[in-house]
Amino acid sequence: MTAEHTAADTEKDARIAANRRRYEELKAAGDHAPASLPGPTPRGLPLPHGPLTREIIPAGWYHTLKLKTGEALRLALIDAPAAVSLICWNAHETTERLNYADTLKIQWTARLQKGRVLFSDMGRVMLSLIEDTSGAHDALMGGSTAASNRARYGARADVERLRNTRDNFILAAGKLGLDRRDIPPAITFFAPVGTDEGGGLVWGTDNRQAGDFVDLRAEMDLLVALSNCPHPLDPRPDYAAGAVEAIRFRATPPDLDDLCRNATPEAARGFENLAR
């Protein structure tokens, strides 16, 4: 054991190795291989005719909206890289809410991309990721807080009152008749977060650019909150983000061979749970 590698590090390594073995055992025991997922959506893919609403979210701000089953939400980078954190609730029973941990565990992946779905804490599909130009999103860490802003930007975080995702979501929840106890952990789109060999969270290759977007189809009636704040791991020195457009539109009804409904047995079961 080196001076740098402590007993705690050894214990952590053993725990990671044990968890990895358990993961591989479970994965090998089931049929978890997804159908072949497509590559990124080309930038510039037009929207269906007649968007229902369009809203510009400036850097640092938030937005709330309601989505009906079958409607979709496009989150689009307008003029520069940005990161958009999202949480959502069942509009009719807000105790059912987004569960990013189950979203990853159930689908056996930490990578969200076109063809994946977002699960609730009741094992039902809330949103389907039907288009995606980047495939680089964070479902591991979550959005910024006042503390992460101080750690990232120093004293100016308080002097300039730099806005953060946690406080944005508290305000958004209030607008929707909810409070801070109702806020689940977020998924952040356009944030290339991964892990290193030691299990630490790292900022990956950043290919974000204006014109990137994701399209999310609502599979149940939803309340949605969005926050456009720099991600805590974003290495850019300045608190800077581009504006984001949130566009609500009517999605094309899914066919029986819809990719999101059939990519994995786990996703199919999520839709079966939804239909009960």
Image (cartoon, rainbow, N blue to C red):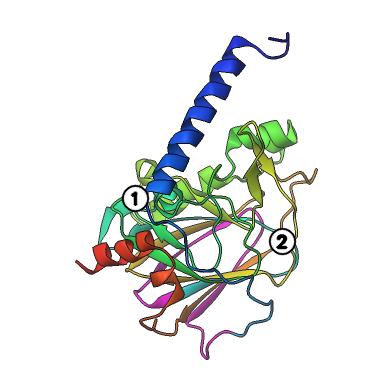
The quarter of the picture where the N terminus appears is top right
Residue found 31% across the figure and 54% down from its top? 123
Extent of the magenta region:
47-71
Q: Can residue 75 be seen in this view?
A: no
**Relative side of 98 to 148, left or right:** left
Image coordinates of residue 54 in percent, x first then y, are 55, 76
Residue found 72% across the figure and 13% down from its top? 4
Earlier sequence position, callout 2 versus callout 1: 1
Residue found 50% across the figure and 35% down from its top? 20
Image coordinates of residue 197 in percent, x first then y, are 66, 35
Instruction: Tell me the amino acid under the disc marked 2.
Output: Gly
Q: Does the magenta stretch include residue 64?
A: yes
Residue nearest the viewer, comparing 18 with 270: 18
The quarter of the picture where the C terminus appears is bottom left
Q: Is residue 116 magenta?
A: no
Alpha-carbon distance for marks 2 and 1? 28 Å
Residue nearest the viewer, comparing 110 with 61: 110
Image coordinates of residue 164 in percent, x first then y, are 59, 45
Residue found 31% across the figure and 67% down from its top? 271
Residue to which mark 1 is pinned: 178
Q: Is residue 118 above or below residue 233?
A: below
Secondary structure of the residue carrying numbered label 1: loop
Q: Can residue 166 be seen in this view?
A: yes
Residue nearest the viewer, comparing 87 with 134: 134
Instruction: Tell me the amino acid under the disc marked 1.
Output: Leu
Residue to which mark 2 is pinned: 242
Callout 2 environment at 10 Å: few (<14), some (14 to 19), or many (20+)? many
Residue nearest the viewer, comparing 156 with 43: 43
Secondary structure of the residue carrying numbered label 2: loop
Q: Which residue lies furthest to the right in this view?
A: 237
Q: Residue furthest bottom?
A: 49
